[in-house]
Amino acid sequence: FRPQGHPDRFQSLSKLAHAYWTRFELSGIPDDLQCAIRLDTEALELRPAGHPNRIPALMALAMDLCASYLKTNRLDDLTREIELEREANHLNPTDSHTAQAFASLLVMRYHATQDAADFDLVTTICSSQTGSQEEGDDDNTTEAAAFLHILVEINTARYQHVGNSTYLVHA
């Protein structure tokens, strides 16, 4: 790949990381995933806060970390992924897909930790997204349904954790 300081180093790192990611997807070799994480981390460093193309770099590393969490159940990977998604959501607050991904990850972490702060944040995100949908638009209806599904999942998990049937009413 391109040496440090080369203007195309980001592209080189990203392409190589994607190649490792693809091979991991096909073979399941953990070392390939770790290489993808390392390369995407280095690529993200070349897209500092304020860079106009930071979001794709955030999402690439987030995807790597999600795969790592699903394979290892290391909460650190999930927490790091959530921080990347939080930043992507902050950089593009009108993108409902980023908000859905962020909320879904918080649900995943809630299942692992039962942290009430995750429950509260998911509820806030989903309520604001479903409240801002306009009637009659099929895309908006589909997006609202996705957020409602996330709300059902988090409220059901909360009920299972605390046993308060109030959460079932909200589900």
Image: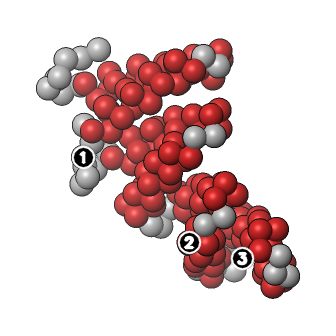
Quadrant location of the N terminus in the rendered image: top left
Image height of 159 relative to 57, above or below = below
Give the mark nearer the N terminus: 2 vs 1: 1
The tag on residue 21 is: none
Residue bearing mark 1: 48
Secondary structure beneath disc 1? loop
Is residue 12 shown left or right of residue 156?
left
Is residue 165 shown left or right of residue 79?
right
Of residues 143 and 113, the one drawn nearer to the viewer in this rendering: 113
How busy is the neighbourhood of tag 1: few (under 14 within 10 Å), some, or many (20 plus)? Answer: few
Of residues 111 and 146, the one drawn nearer to the viewer in this rendering: 111
Please tell me which residue is depicted at 70% across the width and 57% down the height of the picture: 111
Image height of 5 relative to 171, above or below = above
Give the mark nearer the N terminus: 2 vs 3: 2
The tag on residue 136 is: 3
Note whether residue 101 is visible.
yes
Gap in Å between the C-alphas at discs 2 and 1? Answer: 28 Å
Is residue 110 shown left or right of residue 42?
right
Residue 167's spot in the image, x, y percent?
Answer: 79, 79
Place residue 96 in its image quadrant.
Answer: bottom right
Residue flagged by tag 1: what amino acid is it? Pro
Residue flagged by tag 3: what amino acid is it? Gly
Its colouring scheme is secondary structure
Secondary structure beneath disc 2? helix
